[in-house]
Amino acid sequence: MNTDELREIIWEQLFRAKVSKSIDEVAALTGCEPADVRAAVNHEWFTVADDRVSIAYSTPGTRKGRS
């Protein structure tokens, strides 16, 4: 699977779970290597802190195109 497909799968899993997950947990759930997960979540859709991945949320004042 390519990085874009993996990114979509990870986003869906995190959205359904409603909690952050570790890189290793995501790798196990997707059947991918942790390095592949790290590459996929290095994206504006995600926040990674202390090796845990969550969906990135923006506030109305921080969205692009808005002031």
Image (cartoon, rainbow, N blue to C red):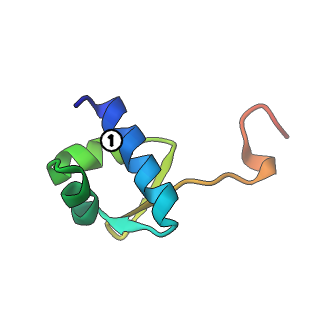
Quarter holding residue 42: top left
Q: Which residue is painted at 73% across and 41% down in the image? A: 63
Q: Residue furthest front?
A: 16
Quarter holding residue 21: bottom left
Horizontal relation, residue 42 to residue 33: left or right: right
Q: Which residue is painted at 51% across and 44% down in the image? A: 45
SS label for mark 1 = helix
Quadrant showing the N terminus: top left
Foreground of the two, 3 or 39: 3
Q: Residues within 10 Å of mark 1 (few under 14, many from 20)?
A: many
Q: Residue furthest right?
A: 67
Horizontal and vertical percent for residue 8? 41, 39
Q: Which residue is painted at 74% across and 54% down in the image? A: 59
Residue indicated by mark 1: 40
Horizontal and vertical percent for residue 4? 36, 31
Mark 1: which amino acid? Answer: Ala
Quadrant showing the C terminus: top right
Horizontal and vertical percent for residue 53? 40, 61
Horizontal relation, residue 32 to residue 46: left or right: left
Question: Is residue 67 placed above or below 56 in the rendered structure?
Answer: above
Q: How many marks?
A: 1
Whether residue 42 is visible: no
Horizontal and vertical percent for residue 22? 31, 67
Q: Which residue is painted at 14% across and 49% down in the image? A: 33
Horizontal relation, residue 35 to residue 47: left or right: left
Question: Is residue 35 placed above or below 53 in the rendered structure?
Answer: above
Foreground of the two, 22 or 47: 22
Whether residue 17 is visible: yes
